[in-house]
Amino acid sequence: MCEVSIMGYYSSVYIAVPSSTYDEIMNEASKKIYAEENEKHCRYVRFLDTAKVFTVEDDKVKIMYWDDVRWYCSYEEVKLINSTMRKGLFAFLRIGEDHTTEYDCRCMDDDDVYHPEFDMPFNVEIKVKWNDDLLLR
């Protein structure tokens, strides 16, 4: 779910998690900000606050979405989100500035129960539209 890049690409990132996992991520963020008021955890909370959040599957699943974000494993905010998310079900989609797509998911819970809502829940479509006003001459 992370890339190593010298270029510094910006990506669109989507993370689908059960609503309970989303609540755990937010609770963990609150605990960290009050327990350790340092810049690292303030950045984490600010990073979470920048996510757009959508609810799907009758409020069973939350999707966090960031656009134009630098998603690197070395960033503390990304480490904290990844560590919480990896404890349970999730679906992850990253579309990079270099037009690469990275997808990862966990469809089985710890009791080996299959969860189809996390089996490739994202459909990616790229549209290209010609703009007649910008004709090459």
Image (cartoon, helix red, strand yellow):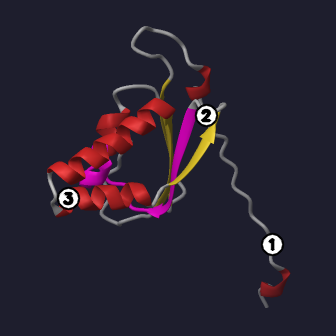
Q: Nearer the viewer, residue 112 or 127?
A: 112
Q: Crowding near pointer 3: few (<14 within 10 Å), some, many (20+)?
A: some
Which residue is at 35% across, 46% downward? 2
**Depicted 76 relative to depicted 105: above or below:** below
What residue lies at 45% left-to-right and 30% top-to-bottom?
20
Q: Amino acid at mark 3?
A: Lys
Query: Which amino acid is tagged 2?
Result: Asp
Magenta residues span 61-80
Front position among marks 2 and 3? 2
Asked if residue 68 shows in the view, the reply is yes
Q: CA distance from mark 2 to mark 1?
A: 38 Å
Is residue 63 on the magenta stretch?
Answer: yes
- Which residue in the structure is indicated by mark 2? 59
Q: What residue type is disc 1 on?
A: Trp
Residue lying at the far front of the rendered structure: 34
Tell me whether the residue at label 2 lies in contact with that at label 1, contact meaning CB atoms closer than 8 angstroms.
no
Q: CA distance from mark 2 to mark 3?
A: 31 Å
Of callouts 2 and 3, the N-terminal one: 3
Quarter of image, res 25: top left
Q: Residue at x 65, y 46 (%)?
A: 124
**For residue 137, what is the image quadrant?**
bottom right
Q: Is residue 15 left or right of residue 4?
A: right
List x then y, in percent, for residue 102: 48, 44
Q: Which numbered dot is residue 130? A: 1
Element type at marker 2? loop
* Residue 81 counted in the magenta span: no
Residue under pointer 3: 40
Which callout, 2 or 1, points at the residue further toward the start of the chain?
2
Q: Position of residue 61 (x, y in %)?
A: 56, 33
Residue 14: image location, x then y, percent:
52, 47
